[in-house]
Image (cartoon, rainbow, N blue to C red):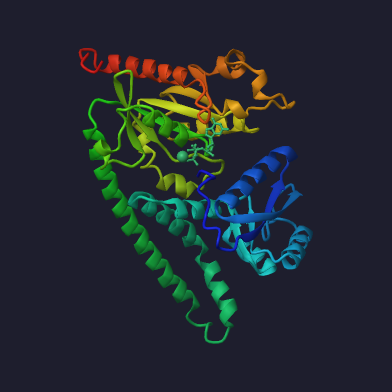
Amino acid sequence: MPRQESFDTTIKQERAVLVGVITQGESEAKVQEYLEELEFLVDTAGGITEKIFTQKITTADRATFVGKGKLEEIQAYVRSEEIDLVVFDDELTPSQIRNIENELEVKILDRSNLILDIFASRAQTAQAKAQVELAQLQYLLPRLTRLWTHLERQKGGIGMRGPGESQIESDRRIIQTKISILKEKLKLIDKQNGTQRKNRGQLIRVALVGYTNVGKSTIMNMLSKSDVFAENKLFATLDTTVRKVVIDNLPFLLSDTVGFIRKLPVHLVECFKSTLDEVREADILMHVVDISHPNFEDQIRIVNETLKELGVADKKTITVFNKIDAWKSESGQEAESLTLDDFRNSWMGKHNSPAVFISALNKENLEELKQLVYEQTKAMHTVRYPYDNLLY
Ligand SMILES: Nc1nc2c(ncn2[C@@H]2O[C@H](COP(=O)(O)OP(=O)(O)OP(=O)(O)O)[C@@H](O)[C@H]2O)c(=O)[nH]1
Ligand SMILES: [Mg+2]
């Protein structure tokens, strides 16, 4: 989800308020970071964050998630500042959404909902579109009652009393039918993709993985453009994110994948499993880390957890620490004061092997990255095809 692909600015930006809770054992600073990320998500979706509310709680209120007093405080702000939507950082139950909506009388979204919305606007291929629609319908299904009561409230009670439940039932059936049609469609696409992947032959496959916005696509573009052999045409029928790259006469396939994020909705992960087959079937992973992000250690952990869930934690991995140009220490020390060796000798260089430090933006230290990818790919190729020296 790159930031630069901003939305049509002629449309009035929706004004948003964010809500996060600080539960026991969570530090305030952490929650602030989570909320900053949520603000970034709202920004990506085309909204503008006007205010952030937080509350310390031991357990979430079953009816309204935050406490009564906090809700009134938010309500006052929403009314006086003409807010369009309120976004909660945590997943809300259908009844919580309904109750909060009744109180605040504006659109209520939770993090999952927001991410789904962004994915829907970004989906390009038939597969991605079907995957997002499936996730959205699965998200909607348990929340149907809410939509119905919403309608009821707008239209008033008269004439609405009888058919309510049966209406929900038929809506539910329609959605379930749609879900199974989409699943069939995805199965078919999956099969075609599987065949295509098999046809790619002996090339070693390298997949870029990492947290969202760390620079995966930038690296992809750089590596594939920087070499004359890299071209789109050959793979026109493949997923658009797979490119053939050649480093020193050694060709391999490089794929760019969807970025990971904290609290990715379960449905979405499920639906994107087949896109992530690209990762599952890769020979080498390039785990890209945005070293300039204050929370990058958490991001590494989240990516590693997601990789474990996908069952690929044991794959050969190259850690690429990107954005060294923008790195800053907690005490405010700037990147210029550090040499590449300082980075290499830090815990990052020592605890992640093999690792490389680059700036994709400034094209800094790219040769080392290429060299590393070359060595790893060649080693993999030699193990797999011991009698085949044709390629180099
Ligand atoms: N300062 C700095 N910015 C960079 C560097 N590499 C990439 N960026 C910027 O980081 C942002 C995200 O880059 P992308 O390549 O879109 O990141 P991504 O990992 O593909 O993101 P998703 O596809 O959303 O998961 C862009 O604005 C890039 O220009 C770098 O080395 N230094
Ligand atoms: Mg990208």
* Residue 201 in which image quadrant: top left
Could you tell me which residue is drawn at 27 percent across and 26 percent down? 203
Q: Nearer the viewer, residue 138 or 16?
A: 16
Could you tell me which residue is drawn at 36 percent across and 62 percent down? 178
Q: Quick check: 39 above or below 213?
A: below
Whether residue 20 sits left or right of residue 112 in the image: it is right
Residue sitting at the far bottom: 158
Specify whether residue 309 is in view.
no
Specify whether residue 147 is in view.
yes
Q: Position of residue 283 (x, y in %)?
A: 35, 25
Whether residue 375 sits left or right of residue 160 in the image: it is left
Q: Position of residue 87 (x, y in %)?
A: 63, 56
Image quadrant occupied by the C terminus: top left
Q: Position of residue 117 (x, y in %)?
A: 50, 55
Could you tell me which residue is drawn at 70 percent across and 42 percent down? 32
Q: Nearer the viewer, residue 118 or 144?
A: 118
Q: Position of residue 159 (x, y in %)?
A: 52, 86
Count of numbered labels shown in the rendering: 0
Q: Quick check: 205 above or below 339?
A: below
